[in-house]
Amino acid sequence: MENACPLCNREYTALNQHLRVSHLVKNIEERGKLVLLVSRRLNIRSEACPVQSCDAQKGTRLDRHFKRSHTELSDGAKTQMLDNLKRRLILGTLGALRASNPSVPMVSTLDLDEAAGLEEEKEVEEEEGEEGECQVTKLKAEVAKLKNQVRELNDGFELSQAYNRNLKRAYAKLKRSALKASKNSVIFGTADVLEYSLPQTSAEDEGSTDIPSGTILCPPFPDHILTLNTLLEEYKELQEGPHPDAKLRNNVQSKLHRIRNFLGWMSKGQSGLAKLKFLNDQKRLKGWVGYLVDCGMARTTSLHYLKNVRQFLVYVKETPPKTLCLGQKDLVMSDRYLKSVIKGWNRHVVQHQMSVKGRKDAIMHTVEELQKCRRLALLAIPKLLSKLEHLHTNSSLWKLQGYVAAYLASLYGHRLGVFINMTDLEVSEAVHGDKDDYLLKMTHHKTNEAFGTAKMLLNKEEYGWLLKLIALKTKCASTTKLSRFVFFNTTSGRNRNLTKYLQMVWSEMHLRGDVNFITLRTAVATFARDKHGEDSVQRKSMARLMCHDTAMADKHYTMDLSVEQARNGRLLFEQSQETTNSRTRPQTEVHDWLQRTTGTDGTTIRLTSSKAAGHTFTLSQQEDELLECYFCHVRAEATKRLTSEQGRFFVDCGANPLTNLYADLQRLRKKYLPQVPGAAVDETRRPPLLRDALHLHRTGQPANTACIPGQTVGQVFGGLSCLSAPPSKRLCVGAGFTAHRPLYRKWRNVQLLERTSYILRCCAWMGRSSRPANMQSGPYPLYFRAELAWASCPGLWGEKGKGVVATCPMDKGDVVCDYHGTLISQAEGRRREDSIYRFFFQELCIDASSRCDCHPEVDTYGRFLNHSRKRPNLKPKRFDLTFPDGPRPVLVFFAMQNIKVGEELLWDYGVTRTSFGGEGKDLAWLDM
Ligand SMILES: C[S@@+](CC[C@H](N)C(=O)[O-])C[C@H]1O[C@@H](n2cnc3c(N)ncnc32)[C@H](O)[C@@H]1O
């Protein structure tokens, strides 16, 4: 046996490792010499000739001498003699090593045995002379027999060692779960744990259910089979590739562990293991699968076992070892069986994952919690920083780090690694933006291979925290060497306990639930997906910042939906079954436009009208500019002359809503915007009117040819619908409409609407040009006279709540609207419940707490006007008007100055903080 171990005589490829692990040969020199004993790679050129009668001198080239001089010897005899010489020399060095009394004790005794053998031989030779030769042969046979026995005993010993190892592992695992159970106050007798013994693994009771949950105890892997060892070694190399990192090595290690378990199970009690025939034992294979179920292992884990084993079998099939005695067909059978089991188990795993997600969702942080976390951290961090500047305590330092990490993680959802590996250098190398913000790029984190650096954009204050934190290091360090990490500990390293400090401040803020960086990350990623949609550009750009693999997250979790997602889904179903009746199409409202959010990747509009609530769509920067231009110039002009509008964003010149926004938007995109995102726009492709509108929008100056005021949306954008003159067939087709007739019908409808609108306009009050006195002549009760939109977006005005913005330009002196409500006496007003919507004037009061009886379907604007003492642009004035049911006082708001589209309308409530004996002394906004 070429590679046979000199101690146990078994074959091994990794002999060195075998000597260390199985024979516990710890002395490196000893191991080296034992390996040499097998390889025989020893230089003997300068040794004396081993042939007894030869008188060749030491120092001559022994190899040449042997070849040339000893022609009386056969080649075999020569090799044998040289081998013996090498062996003797190596054993001699082993003896010398022993004599040097090495600090790591030696295990082998080959040199001693050899010496004893020689001694005996000598004695025998001396005592028995020539007759003794036959006796020596007998003894040799005896020695060989004994060696065989030793080998068998060794086998047994190794098997029980492997059993022992498995037992130890199982015992430790049980002990851990017992400890966990006792922590959870579940009564769990230790006897139950300790009395557990190895399961019987005979063929009959494979699949025994006595095994404790989650424990896998397979018969040991047949360590002594060279083929199996080599096979696994090669498989390992293949899996690890040329440059494995620690994580990959670990993964491969786990895979091999599972495969070894499997091979142990399959090979137990079988013979001819090197031929791998046991892999074809279908009964055993089924027993093993059953065993995975019965040992109570988690489905996901057992799926790993199945997949790893299947992959290994494929490997064996494709690159069979020389000794393999199995046909391809046999391996295909096993593979098919495993494939079908995996398929079935996948179903369980998906269900399991969904239930895990359900549980996670139930305890997931809410948006409000994340907001509260940042609000409170914002207050706590400056306090802690100034405290630490004066007096250093570790507890304040940890708290500070906890708050900073909580603040940043609740915003960006970065992993723990991003924070604890963030270095001073990375902070100092942050890119300074022109808005006084800083872009930080962190290199060392878990997914840097796939995503590159993890990024955070911080404002000046947040960036200042990090700088101050770094500056604190000199005060806090207990060693002279300073840590290079921003979240440092006191011994020049990184703060590995950051999660603990995050949890500490979390509970200090009285926030709900268990927190760690992953729970925050999950929450942030989920909100991003829910708010912007699964495939949205916004979500993708957020994921890039936080280095989040959305594909992986979706792969696991898209199967389950939140109520919100299901609602959106339902909407799609409903929409897909709608008729083409334009009334049922989603509408874009003016306040949707006002509340659009703009990010680096474009503008998102979220529709709020009941038909389309929650529906979002994204515009490019160019589209945003076009529509803003439309909003400020085209729409504003078109609606200025009208008495009311429905808050629709897209209207024609008669303020009649255009309802086919989606289709029109698509056509616009196709026709006037570059197909390749980011490419330059060919201005010449745009219709002249649109060019003029854009010119006006960009420069504030009308183009020479500009005739924007009074143009319809259709005319400006070229070939859209609802023109006030029937479009030509060429224009229709050019704009992407295939049929001419429907548009013509549409045009006729518009004419009808125009007529109605004209009649109403003539009878009613004409907003801008009217005088308040004209109001009384109109057949319609007064409610609002300017084109306004209110927005309920808290982000728009912060604490103010709702407010009103101008959606058409107004001139100084224009009537804007009235304060519409129920007129009551001042005394009655005071008696009524407290409400912020009461307007007291002289002896009267208008109560606008709820919608009025005359217009129950609309929110009139007067009551939503906010206060400004320093920069009001409206002023209320009382008029006594005569209505059909008699005279009545009315409060009318006038524009105090020219007002642009998009400006908030404000009036001075006439109250300061000191009014009414200082009742409003805490309301800072009263003086603003
Ligand atoms: C007539 S309401 C105005 C509409 C109100 N913002 C809403 O959402 O219903 C008056 C109330 O609005 C709030 N408010 C008005 N002007 C404000 C301002 N400049 N800053 C903060 N809050 C304001 C105050 O709470 C006030 O009592």
Image (spheres, rainbow, N blue to C red):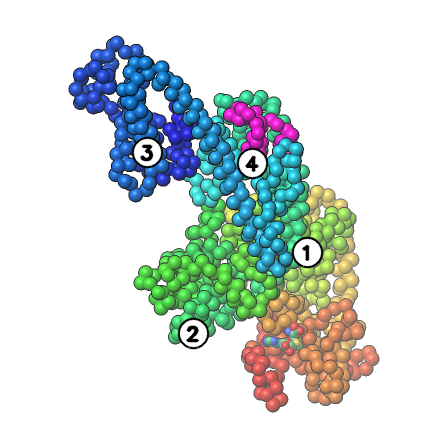
Q: Secondary structure at mark 3?
A: helix
Q: Earlier in the sequence, mark 2 or mark 4?
A: 4
**Of circles 2 and 4, which is in front?**
4
In the rendering, at what x and y percent does residue 725 appear?
71, 53
Q: Earlier in the sequence, mark 3 or mark 4?
A: 3
- The crowding category of the residue bearing disc 3, from other C-alpha atoms within 10 Å (few below 14, some 14 to 19, many at least 20), is few
Residue type at mark 4: give it: Pro
Q: Which residues are magenta?
A: 262-289
Left or right: 424 with respect to 100? right
Between the C-alphas of marks 2 and 3, the distance is 63 Å
Depth order, front residue of 603/892: 603
In the rendering, at what x and y percent does residue 68 appear?
22, 12
**Disc 4 marks which residue?**
219
**Of circles 1 and 2, which is in front?**
2
Mark 1 in CB contact with mark 3 (< 8 angstroms):
no
- The crowding category of the residue bearing disc 4, from other C-alpha atoms within 10 Å (few below 14, some 14 to 19, many at least 20), is many
**Of circles 1 and 3, which is in front?**
3
Between the C-alphas of marks 1 and 3, the distance is 69 Å
- The crowding category of the residue bearing disc 1, from other C-alpha atoms within 10 Å (few below 14, some 14 to 19, many at least 20), is few
Left or right: 720 with respect to 323? right
Q: Earlier in the sequence, mark 4 or mark 1?
A: 4
Q: Earlier in the sequence, mark 2 or mark 3?
A: 3
Image quadrant for the C terminus? bottom right
**Disc 1 marks which residue?**
564
Quarter of image, res 104: top left
Farthest residue in the top direction?
72
Q: Secondary structure at mark 2?
A: helix
**Disc 3 marks which residue?**
32
> Image point 73% across, 73% down: which residue?
783
